[in-house]
Amino acid sequence: MSTTAPYRSSARAQLHALRCRQITARSLLDQTLAHLAKVNPGLNAVVTLDIAGARAAADAADRHFAATGTTLGPLHGLPITVKDALETKGMRTTCGSPDLTDRIPAQDADVVALLRAAGALIIGKTNTATMCQDIQTSNPVFGKTKNPFDQTKTPGGSSGGPAVAVAAGLTALEIGSDLAGSLRLPAAYCGVYALRTSRGAAPIVPTRGHIPRPPRWLTSSDMIALGPIARTAADLAVLLDVIAAPAPADGAAWRIDLPAPKFTSLSQYRVGIWADDDYCRVDSATRGLLDRVTRLVRGAGATVDDSSRPVELATSDRLFRRLMYATGSVSASDEAFAADCEAADALTDDPSAFHLKSRTMRHRDWARADEDRHKLRGRWADYFTEHDILITPAAPTAAVDDQTSVPSHQRYITVDGERRSFFDQTSWINLAGPVGLPSIVLPAGSTSTGLPLAIQIIGPYLSDRALITAAQQLARILPTPATPPVFTA
């Protein structure tokens, strides 16, 4: 390992040091906990800790390695936090909801079980929006998580705690969840990498044990995907190798064998670039970033197409929102859903009825929306016969002002002085959501005030490994990501 403090190194470097006996699991854990104790109180990223359990697991890992010379798995001895939306056996799991304040699950979420089986040390839980239902990170149980670059800005949500924990060096890897950008928007705002994994009829990362749905439910939204957050693209692959697995019920017969990358150089790629769109204009800093990325990619020898579009952004976003509102109604009480149906029926052609009409649509209407989704997937598949990746903005701007104390109907963002919808923040990253495509957000520079800027790359269905390689190759030509001051505190 380099002279960098071990806990500040990449996950790959930490795992290498553990395997080569340069550091013990217990020593790495204690260094990580010491940094966390110093930095986390000012950020509120990690909200639950199991120090005794983590130390017992670290000591057990060290004893096993000393006795056998073999590791417990590919994540042997690596301290990791996980989003508080994922159930952890014996460890408080609230999803930021007062109704779940004291909930201690008796079973791990499937993805958490995969982490433990790989030898990871689950040291604690990271903050989320209440029931993952905001694109900021605050809740009545634990309060607000702060952006490590500027505490007046939001870290995004709902996986704000995970993104801040990675950016601040409290963990090298995290697991977040993503429906409407909940994984990737925080990564963009906090200057780290995140991968929304492929999702078809079933996800490639099992979702049972993710809240919401309510505890003990076996199903999840048909668009939610879990994925890794890391400080490097290569570290995304470390975690993907562990968590890309069939659900336990399918494990006897199914295997997930994601295709290997085809290209070794950026010059081999056919790159689509979608820099801006009338439906969701980006600000001057973000547009300048996309122009710079276009020049750099061309300069690297790639074939660049900045005019073709796989879909219409407005059409895709509207379909996504219809499906999202529909899936969000599943766990509502019978009384609440009946009231929504009554209210929706009373609003005939009122434009404000879109949310309620979508939330209460008949199964026939949902099936037709699902058919539209499959047609949209077909258009993306056609696009990727002539392109290998698509680069887009991650968001219209860098991190926006924190508005957790502002009533939801009064929130907005400002884009080059223009007041815009609060939910415009997710329009670009919602492109991948309805069609289940893998999408990576990666840091790509900074604003004049030092806030991270980011881009998104989208690839064909099940190209998750190839997309990580593309992110690695892009990272070589992009500016070095900014690091928040607390990282080296």
Image (cartoon, helix red, strand yellow):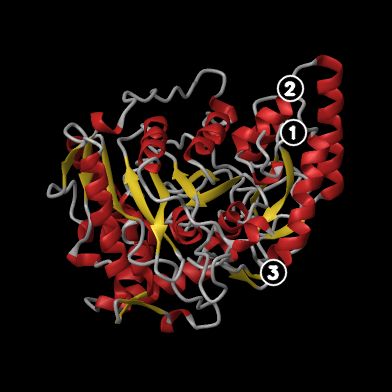
Q: Which amino acid type corresponds to the residue marked 2 in the rendered image? A: Thr
Mark 3 neighbour class, 10 Å CA radius: few under 14, some 14 to 19, many 20 or more: some
Q: Is residue 9 above or below residue 262?
A: below
Asked whether 312 or 119 is in front, the reply is 119
List the residue tagged with mark 2.
71
In the rendered structure, the answer to whether residue 144 lies left or right of residue 358 reads right
Asked whether 484 or 110 is in front, the reply is 484
Mark 1 neighbour class, 10 Å CA radius: few under 14, some 14 to 19, many 20 or more: many
Mark 2 neighbour class, 10 Å CA radius: few under 14, some 14 to 19, many 20 or more: some
Q: Please provide percent x and percent y for residue 7.
A: 70, 44
List the residue tagged with mark 1.
77
Quadrant assignment for the N terminus: top right
What distance separates the C-alpha of mark 2 from that of mark 1? 8 Å
Residue 145 quadrant: bottom right
Q: Is residue 442 above or below residue 282?
A: above
Asked whether 128 or 263 is in front, the reply is 263
Q: Which amino acid type corresponds to the residue marked 3 in the rendered image? A: Gly
Total number of numbered labels?
3
Farthest front residue in view: 3
Q: Which amino acid type corresponds to the residue marked 1 in the rendered image? A: Gly
Kindly state the secondary structure of the residue where label 2 is placed. Answer: loop
Q: Please provide percent x and percent y for residue 120.
A: 70, 35
Question: Residue, x 18% and y 31% (percent of image)?
Answer: 385
Residue 131 visible in the snapshot = yes
Kindly state the secondary structure of the residue where label 1 is placed. Answer: loop
Kindly state the secondary structure of the residue where label 3 is placed. Answer: helix
Question: Do the residues under discs 2 and 1 have CB atoms within 8 angstroms?
Answer: yes
Question: Residue, x 36% and y 70% (percent of image)?
Answer: 356
Of callouts 2 and 1, the N-terminal one: 2
